[in-house]
Image: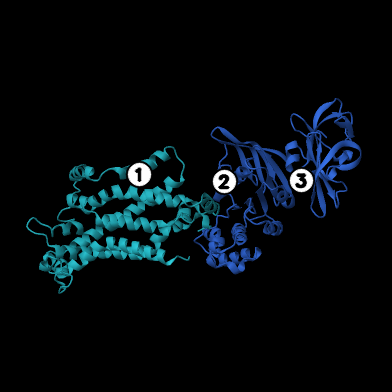
Amino acid sequence: MSQLGNVRLQGVVKRHGETTVLHGVDLEIRAGEFFVLLGPSGSGKTTTLRILAGLESVSAGQVLMDGVDVTGAEPGARDVAMVFQSYALYPHMTVAQNIGFPLKMIGTPKEAIAQAVADAAARVSIGHLLQRRPGQLSGGQQQRVALARAIVRQPKLFLLDEPLSNLDAKLRLETRLELKQLQRALGVTAVYVTHDQEEAMTLADRVAVFMDGRIVQVATPREIYSRPAQVAVAGFIGTPPMNLVPALWRDDAVVIDGVAHPVGARTPQTREVTLGVRPGELRAGGAGTEARVEYIEELGDHCIVDLKAGDTRLRLKAEGQAGVREGETIHLGFAPGAAHLFDRASGERLN
Amino acid sequence: MQRSVPRRVALFAVAGLLVSVWAFPVLWALLTSFKTERDVLAYPPVLVFAPTLANYREVLFGSSSILPNLWSSLVVSCWATVLTMLFALPAAYALARLRYPGKRASGFFVLATQMLPPVGLIIPYYLVLQRIGGLDSYSGLVTIYLTFSLPFAVWLMVSYFEDIPYEMEEAALLDRAGRLRTLWYVILPQVGGGIAVTTVFVFLNAWNEFLFAVVLGGNKVRPVTVAMFNFISVEQTQWARLAAGAMVAMAPVILVGLAAQRHIVKGLTVGAVKGGGRR
């Protein structure tokens, strides 16, 4: 039943021959949580998902589900369901047969299958398509069939591998919302892989950010946005991404091009840092660092100002009108609390 | 699609020419099968003659009836086909899917057996069958047919299996189907076209086989191809009976072809529509 669904990865390592895809992943996913694995392609997030599904073996480490070691268990023995990026619907079966297939495989009586199929189909509003074949459906409808097939058995764990990536932008937004509602309604644990940070932010209860086969941060979307643990995470999250500038941290301020900006945190000794400031937190005016306005991108309710300070490109996000003109030279500043400080060498967060 | 008139005419002309080249021997044999031996040998050839069913009567119910031989052919071909498919399907699936050391080499080996000229194998096969008492027996001839139909079928089926995305199987595994039921419920139905094509080819190869049958068969196992050979003797060739025999022998083949036609066309075009979305 779907009451539990607690998952733990302990020191999971995955090697393909000489290359190591995952360097010791530790992760705890709580029951009922919508958990997103976020990262650029090749960062190991899909491999992690496939390890959870049992489709991929581990080179070292353990996979625990509700406290039971399932590291070596076959996919079918794990009580997990998965929605594939390509949906992987069975093309020779009708929609009803596709959805009912997992139940048929565990020997559910015909009437019970029909009932469960009707329920699952209704949940994703495809009740009218049951007699069609996947080839006669649109991409969005196929996606719903894949969802219905995954929820029909009421699994402990629901795995989704970039399920929205084949849909057009408008449909993606709608489905995203429905997906979240569905997960809440079923109370099932969901693990969702995506490279789209916006998807991760909107869907997740918690996010694990993957970089180069390692988890660099596990936190709520809010925290990942407001306190990224790594300079790489800071650069990956947010649209447009965070401005990252090399700077010197001295006492309670960072120095850029000779101009000191207070950061509200003190350092015992002067050190080289990467300063991060979100485009929305940059302020024009006052006696800050000098920058030239290159372009202004009007986006209706807000606009993005492209700036050049010395050799560094910066972006400023302004609500409503920009209040500056292209070619103008302005002075930039930010509130002390808006500064993110990262070690220049290791990229670790300092404040 | 709109085509200009001259283009269409040219297309029909070429198509007509090709069809007549392919069809001519068959039609001529059909004509011959209704002639008397005298009409057959008439020169110049006659197109208008009094048709007779005597040849059919003779090859079906006469002293040189080929009915037992048709039965013989049917037994050999059916067994060869059933056994071939039974072994070829799992083998091809394994070759297409499982990763194991030497996979590449074993795939090539399967194909390499097709490169041996059959004539070179007759004598070794004869000696082997003689040693184990397999000459002039159904099991012997079927076994020999398997040696070349099996690699052929495996090789053909591998490409059909390879067309099925891995994710389809992974989905089935997660749906708790297990390996065997995944094969049965998810994989095999999708290669139905390929199975039809391969079955027909294997059956036709066995049905039309002559060389091994004439050497390794005998009085007990004498397929129809060998029996028809008896109409050709040193003194004379009974062309009309030969033609009638050929027509009778062709009938099951044509039936099989017609029955499987839809699948064959579908099977042959698999992979041609990859860009066209999910099949």
Q: Residue furthest right?
A: A286
Q: Label 3 vs label 1: CA separation?
A: 56 Å
Q: What amino acid does circle 1 point to?
A: Leu
Q: Residue at x 85, y 40 (%)?
A: A338
Looking at this view, is A314 or A178 the one in front?
A314
Check residue B94 in the rendering and tell me which mark sits there, or answer none.
Answer: none
Q: Which mark is residue B111?
A: 1
**Callout 1 secondary element:** helix
Quadrant hosting residue B109: top left
At 66% from the left and 49% from the top, the residue drawn is A191
Do discs 3 and 2 share a chain?
yes
For the residues labelled 3 and 2, the Cα–Cα distance comes to: 37 Å
Pointer 2 and pointer 1 on the same chain: no
Q: Mark 3 or 1, which is nearer the eye?
A: 3
Judging from the image, mark 1 belongs to the subunit labelled B
Please tell me the numbered disc located at residue A240. 3
Check disc 2: other Cα within 10 Å, few if <14, some if 14-19, many if 20+.
Answer: many
Of circles 3 and 2, the one toward us is 3
Name the residue type under label 2.
Gly
Q: Colour of chain B?
A: cyan
Q: In the rendered image, is residue A342 in sight? A: yes
